[in-house]
Amino acid sequence: DNALNWNEINHELLNTFARVLIADTNDVIYAAGWEAGIFQSMDDGESWTLVSDGLTALAIYSLAINSNNHIFAGTYEYVFRSTDNGESWVELSNGLGSWDIRALAINSIDYIFAGTWPNTQINGVFRSINNGESWTQVGLSEHAVSSLAINSNDYIFAGTIGGVYRSTDNGETWTSGGIGVFTSVVSLAINSSNHIFAGTNDSYGIFRSTNNGQSWMPVNNGFSGASVYS
């Protein structure tokens, strides 16, 4: 009822917390529990089944689903892929290695982008053009990337400790996301009008851009200014 009333539907998830949620084109929901793997619901959350066979890293930061309903999970070590609705998972580390995969995003031609957090000497954004089989570092190597979002023009936006960056060429080059955001951006979302919303984690609240990231304004009327993780 458009969020007027809420019902708790954790059930099997009661002993963990869902860090990230995503749904495929068949309305199957996947919930990633911290250090608990991935759960699946096929009945709008009424019941959940653990679907983590082959998933050796159980702390999940991010989930993404491509046009073939292949699921990708970013963990504290690797990216994993399932091509059978979560029944089994394989590790994808060729060219990527062991990282904190904080963010995943997939564009209209199924290129996959992974945002990494610093736990080794190389960070930034990695790209796969072959369903995750191999990865190439494509920029922002000096930045910790905590969020990614892609708009209807396939422009990629990356939230970092130093603000927002944008790529208009599948990650080949990046530019600073304009003026107005001067703090750490940990979450990004884009609506049907291509308005971009950036959530921060240091009490600056939410920023919005209506011009593809060229400029940003705070939009916190009625909002307490807490950290915004999603």
Image: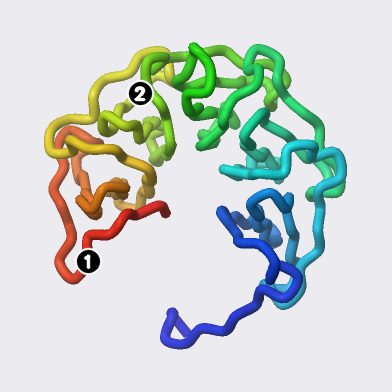
Question: Where residue 10 sits in the image (x, y, percent)?
Answer: 66, 73
Q: Which of marks 2 and 1 is in front?
A: 1
Q: Which residue is drawn at 61% across and 21% down?
A: 128
Residue to which mark 2 is pinned: 167
Q: In this view, does 107 lie above or below 134?
A: below
x and y percent of residue 157 in the render? 36, 33
Judged left or right of residue 174, residue 87 is right
Among numbered discs 2 and 1, the one appearing first in the sequence: 2
Q: Residue at x 40, y 52 (%)?
A: 229
Dot 2: element: strand
Q: Is residue 200 above or below residue 1?
A: above
Residue 105 visible within the image: no
Identify the amino acid type marked 2: Ser
Q: State the image quarter where residue 127 is shown.
A: top right
The residue wearing badge 1 is: 224
Measuring 42% from the left and 30% from the top, which residue is drawn there? 145
In space, the residues marked 2 and 1 are separated at their CA atoms by 31 Å
Tag 1's secondary structure? loop
| Quadrant (top left, top right, bottom left, bottom right) of the C terminus | bottom left
What amino acid does circle 1 point to?
A: Ser
- What's the image's color scheme? rainbow
